[in-house]
């Protein structure tokens, strides 16, 4: 795997959702690579925006607060950009069921605002889209490769499929450069720690650090595929750097080491040095959208870019706990 | 295949898009079966609404003109309905590319209005959704079965996937009874004949009857799977009648006899007794969204309900031409 940073030196890069966990971690790497970074973020109170995420690069990025649905702002912001890492969307499964119209407005209409802006005002810009494993939903088989059909179990998943689909439609019809990375469950530093609506491992870290008891549904044996945020960000950097191999393609990310939620929770409690866990019955509304074991076949992306996840869960969780022990005040 | 009509005697049935080709043909059958039919239709000038489609049942159906996005009207109209045949949507591929926001507003938000209405005001109602072969888009293989992934090539196709996806999400999460029939290219009587935005065979019939020359892109050898409208409607009746076998499932329709566009056009010109055809180069914007040969594996639906298409293309086209010769004035 070659160092992708060189591709960004002197380039103009727009990052939507740039104040959140993925977007800010990416922005740190882009600044390090010598890119001219503009962050777009809605700063919606339920999402992951946190100014503390920019600690160390505050003066080297431009931050523009606006919603991706703001047509005039987006039309202007995309101009002359070389790359658009499009990460800023509604991300809560639960909220998409509570207010499906809100999710449609952001994740369908809002995404179309972004693509229309690129089509009309930045036709050379390369869009790298943050997809999700939630697009697959009900599974026919594991590991899941990119040809697996998509049967999402929540409105959020349906709309993430749609938003990715618009990107490929615009790629075919208007030659918009577009790549989708279907991200797994991510965890790591800079993630919001204020609610459980998304980012389960980070939420468990908070509970453990607060000395609380973590509730695992059922026997906790459901397998998930967790990526440490820095590994996911390396994938985004590679997908952007290797446009000739990634343009027009969708790729799964994955860890290669699916873990049960119970294993992950045991590690969280161990590294936090506090907290506990217990098993409780599945709440019916959660059970209804549970899709069973998930782990990804990400060999297509490895073949295209050489990417491999580097960070074992033990190491990733240790680093994450240490980060929040040092920066608790900014995230609690 | 048993006669499905019995299932509808005395039942309350709502048909969205009920003034169009599929919806009105279905309404005729439902009236014949003794159902209490309410038609909802937006009467949008680009869509297929035509009062002439109700000739013979005008006094035996209730027609309510409103958009499916009309929340209060839809909430009221679904009450006490036993069946909802949900056919009324934006249907033009081309227009979905010209104004993607309009398509999103109808086909994402509007569909959600319908499902939310059912969820909250008619939880026992069984929703049969008109999907489309356009959901599949770029194909890995033919014949296409229901497990094939979906890679639509236009915004319309993406949003039809989303609208179907919301239905299955509501089925799993709220136990909404839901079935999707992924309809092929349909043709037949009662179809709009005013523009070429959808319904290609009917448009060709108009051109031939008007003595015009039909232009076929490329060599006209692209295969399509055409269903005569009455066969498609029989499928809808069966899907509704066999709720225990169809609820929660998606099914392809198909003809079992894929035909090239050239073969179909030759028949059209022959039966019309006028017109001609010629080959022209693919327009780039059409080529960009062309997906190659399509034909469906519909054996899943045959196994579930016994459905088989009955009408050979020769017979279907003959009947269609005869219909428009008799009713030209109402459709031209």
Image (spheres, coloured by chain):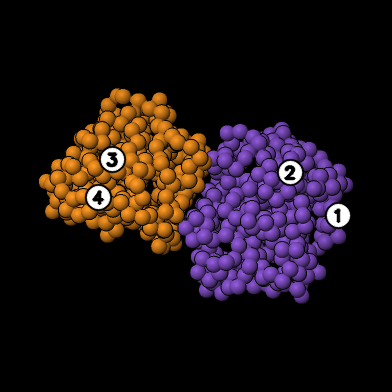
Chain colours: A purple, B orange
Who is closer to the viewer here, A148 or B124? A148
Q: Badge 4, how many Cα within 10 Å: few under 14, some, many 20+? A: some
Q: Are marks 1 and 2 in contact (CB under 8 Å)?
A: no
Q: Badge 1, how many Cα within 10 Å: few under 14, some, many 20+? A: some
- Separation (CA) of disc 1 from disc 4: 73 Å
The residue where tag 2 is placed is A255
* Residue A183 position in % (x across, y down): 66, 49
The residue where tag 1 is placed is A322
Does label 3 lie on the same chain as label 1?
A: no
In this rendering, which labeled residue sits more in front, label 4 or label 2? 4
The residue where tag 4 is placed is B277
Q: What residue appears at the point 70 percent right and 37 percent down from the top-left corner?
A: A223
Q: How many numbered discs? A: 4
For disc 3, the chain is: B
Up/down of A128 relative to A215, above or below: below
In this rendering, which labeled residue sits more in front, label 3 or label 2? 3
Using residue A93 as the reference point, say whether residue A320 is left or right of it. right
| Residue sitting at the far left | B326
Does label 3 lie on the same chain as label 4?
A: yes
Does label 4 lie on the same chain as label 1?
A: no
Q: Is residue B22 visible?
A: no
- Label disc, if present, on residue B263 of the rendered structure: 3
- Separation (CA) of disc 4 from disc 2: 56 Å
Looking at the figure, which quarter contains the C terminus of chain B?
Answer: bottom left
* Residue A161 position in % (x across, y down): 54, 49
Up/down of A145 relative to B89, above or below: above
């Amino acid at each position: 795997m070659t160092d992708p940073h060189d591709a960004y030196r002197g380039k103009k890069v727009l990052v939507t959702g740039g104040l959140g966990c993925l977007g800010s971690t990416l922005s740190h790497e882009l600044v390090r690579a010598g890119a001219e970074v503009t962050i777009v973020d809605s700063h919606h109170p339920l999402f992951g925006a946190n100014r503390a995420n920019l600690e160390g690069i505050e003066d080297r990025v431009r931050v523009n607060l606006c919603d991706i649905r703001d047509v005039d702002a987006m039309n202007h912001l995309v101009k002359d950009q070389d790359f658009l890492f499009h990460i800023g969307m509604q991300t809560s499964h639960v909220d998409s069921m509570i207010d499906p119209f809100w999710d449609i407005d952001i994740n369908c209409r809002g995404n179309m605002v972004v693509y229309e802006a690129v089509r009309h005002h930045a036709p050379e810009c390369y869009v790298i889209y943050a997809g999700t494993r939630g697009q697959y939903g009900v599974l026919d088989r594991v590991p899941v490769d990119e040809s697996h059909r998509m049967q999402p179990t929540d409105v959020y998943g349906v709309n993430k499929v749609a938003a990715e689909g618009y990107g490929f439609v615009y790629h075919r019809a208007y030659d918009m450069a577009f790549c989708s990375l279907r991200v797994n469950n991510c965890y790591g530093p800079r993630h919001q720690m204020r609610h459980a609506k998304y980012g389960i491992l980070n939420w468990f870290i908070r509970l453990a650090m607060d000395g609380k008891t973590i509730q695992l549904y059922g026997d906790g044996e459901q397998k998930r595929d967790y990526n440490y945020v820095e590994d996911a960000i390396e994938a985004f950097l590679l997908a952007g750097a290797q446009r000739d191999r990634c343009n027009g393609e969708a790729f799964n990310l994955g860890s290669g080491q699916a873990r049960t939620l119970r294993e992950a929770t045991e590690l969280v409690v161990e590294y936090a040095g506090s907290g506990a866990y217990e098993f409780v019955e599945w709440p019916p509304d959660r059970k209804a959208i549970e899709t069973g074991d998930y782990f990804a076949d990400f060999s297509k992306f490895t073949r295209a870019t050489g990417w491999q996840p580097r960070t074992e869960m033990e190491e990733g969780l240790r680093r994450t706990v240490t980060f929040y022990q040092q920066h608790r005040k900014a995230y609690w």
